[in-house]
Image: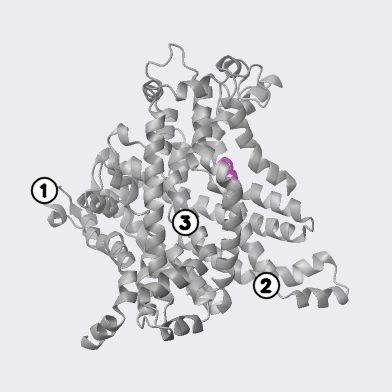
Amino acid sequence: MQAVLKEIWKHKVIYALALPAVVYTFIFGYMTLPYLVIAFEKYNFRQGLLSEFVGLKNFKFFFGSSWAWTVTRNTVVLNFLFIIIGAVFAILLAILLNEVRAKKFLKFSQSAMLFPYFISWIIVSYILDGILNTETGMFNRWLASMGSDKINFYSTPDYWYPILIFLRIWKGSGYTSIIYLAAITGMDEGLYEAAYIDGASRFKRILHITLPLLFPTVCILTLMDVGRIFYGDFGMFYAIIRDNGQLMPIAEVIDTYVYRTFRLTGDPGVSMAIGLYQSIVGFILVFGSNWIIKRNYPEGALF
Amino acid sequence: MAAFAALCLLPFLLVIIASLSSEKSITLNGYTYFPSEWSLEAYKVMTAPSSSLPRSYLITIAVTGIGTFCAALITYCAGYALANRLCKYRNALALYFFATMVFSAGLVPWYMIAKMLGCYNNIFALIVPSLMFSPFNMFLVRNFIAGIPDSLNESARIDGAGELHIAFRIYFPLCTPVLATVTLFYAIGYWNNYFNAVMLLDSQKLYPLQMLLFKIQSEITMMSRVLQGVNLNPPKESFKMAAAVVVMGPIILLYPLLQRYFIKGMIVGAIKG
C-alpha cells in the first residue's frame, strides 16, 4: 500500500489530472451501488437506505403484473430489430459509399446522411407529427387527396414497430456507416489490386475481401449494442411516444416504464427492482455475448 | 444511396417551409412543401418581449457552453493521464472507468444522488448529472494520444518541461482532431438533452429549449403560456415549426464545420479503437 502511494506521489501531477474524472465516475457510477438495496425495501424518504426490509416483494409486484412481459418484450424485440436491420443497412451504405468515385458527391451524401444524427429526438417527433398527424399531416392529406380514408397513426399500435425501426435507421445509420467506411478505407489496397489482376469482379471483391475484413468491426459494434439490448433509449421513446396510453402496449420500454413507476407512483422500491433486473440481465448479456464471440472468433471480441 | 441522402434532408426542409407558411395555409392544406401563402408571423411572435423562448435559448446556450467546456477539459486530462507511460496504474484506472460502462444501477440512484448533490431545480441540474463526463469519449482521447510516439514526451522531459507544460502546451495542440470530435459529442449531448430537465426540474423558468419544445407539443396550455399576451389568434402550427427551426438553427449553421471535424475525428478514433 505504501509503495502504491509512493508511486502515485512521485507522479502526482499526472494522477491529479485524472482526478476530476475519477471523482465524477465515483459519484455517478460507484456511489449508486449502495442504492441497490432499495430494491428489497419498502422505501420511505425519512429512513432512506435503512428503510424496512421486505425481501422480494417489489420484484413480485413487478413480475406479477402484465407489464413485466410487455416492456421486456418491447425492449428486446425492438432493440434486436434495430441492431440487425441497422447493421445490414449501415454496411450496405458504407460499401456503396466506398464505391463512389465522384469526390463531391461522396462528401455531399455523407454529410446529408449524418445530419439526422445531430438532431434531437424532440425535433424528430415534430417532423413525424408533421407527416402523420390526422388533421394536418402531409401523409394523411395525401391519402385524403387520393380519396382514401385517413389513418389515425397515433391511436393504432400496429404501425409503430415499423415506424420506430424506420426512425432509428434514418437517424443512426449515417453515423454507423462512417465507422464502417473508415474500417473499409483502412484495408490493404494490395488485396484489391491482386484480386483485380486475378479477374475478380467488383461484386466478388466486395463479397470475398471487404465483407470478411469488415467482420471484426461489425462484431465489436454489434456486441456493444447487444450489451445494451435491455436498455430502451429513453430519449427516443419518450420524445416520440410521450404519454400516449394507446401506444404503450407496443412501445413502452423498460426505461420509460421505470420512469413512469418512479415519477407517477413515487415508489422508488419497485422502480429500483426493475432497474436491478435490467442491470443484471444487461450485465450477463454483455459478458455472455462477449464470451461466445471470443470462443468462436477472437478478433471480434470487445474485451 | 442518393435517395437515402435526400430522405435525410427533405424532412428538415418541410419543417423550414412549414415555419414560413401562414397559419391559414397549414389548416387548409396541411403540412406541404408548396404552401398557398407565406408568412413570417411565427417568427415575429417568437421575438415578442413576453415570449419565453429567448429565455430558454439563453439557458441552453449557457448550459451547453459551460458544460461542454468542463466536460472536454475533464475528458482530455483523464485521457492524457491514462495514455501516459509514467502513470503506472493506468490499466487499473482504465478498468475503473470501463466497469461503469457495462454496469449501471439505473434511474433511481442517479436521481437520488443528483438531488443529494443539490442538482435539483437549478441550472446545475442541467449541467452536472451524467452529461459532464463520458468514459467512451475519454477512451477516444486516450487512444489518440497513445498513437503519438513516446519519444516526444521523453524529449520534452529532457528539455526540462514540467508535467503541465507537456500536457497542455505540447500534447494539447496535437490532439485537435480528437478534441474537436469529443467537444462536438458533448456539445450535441447538452444541446439535445431533455432528460435532465424531465427528471430534475420543476420550475418552468429554467426549461432548456428541448424541454420547452417537448412541452409545447404535449401540453396545449404550454403553448398559450409561451405565446402569452402576444396575439389573440396565435399561429400555433407554424409557431411550433418555427421554434423547431430556431432550435436546430445553430446546428444547421455550424454543420459544414462540425461534420468535417467529426468525420475526421471518427475515422481517427475508429481506426485506433
Q: Residues within 10 Å of mark 1 (few under 14, many from 20)?
A: few
Residue position marked by numbered label 2 in the rendering: A213
Q: Residue B206 got which mark?
A: none
Indicate which disc, 2 or 1, sits on the residue closer to the N terminus.
1
Residue position marked by numbered label 3 in the rendering: B183
> Distance from label 3 to label 2 (Cα)?
31 Å
Q: Above or below — where is A66 with respect to A280?
A: above
Region rendered in magenta: A162-167
Subunit ID for the residue under disc 1: A
Where residue B171 appears, as percent x and y from the top left, is 47, 72
Task: Provide the secondary structure element on which disc 2 rests.
Answer: helix
The N terminus of chain A is located in which quarter?
Answer: bottom left
Residue lying at 57% horizontally and 77% vertically, measured from the top left:
A299
- Can the viewer see residue A147? no
Where residue A172 appears, as percent x and y from the top left, is 57, 51
Residue position marked by numbered label 1 in the rendering: A46
As drawn, is A34 to the left or to the right of B248?
Answer: left
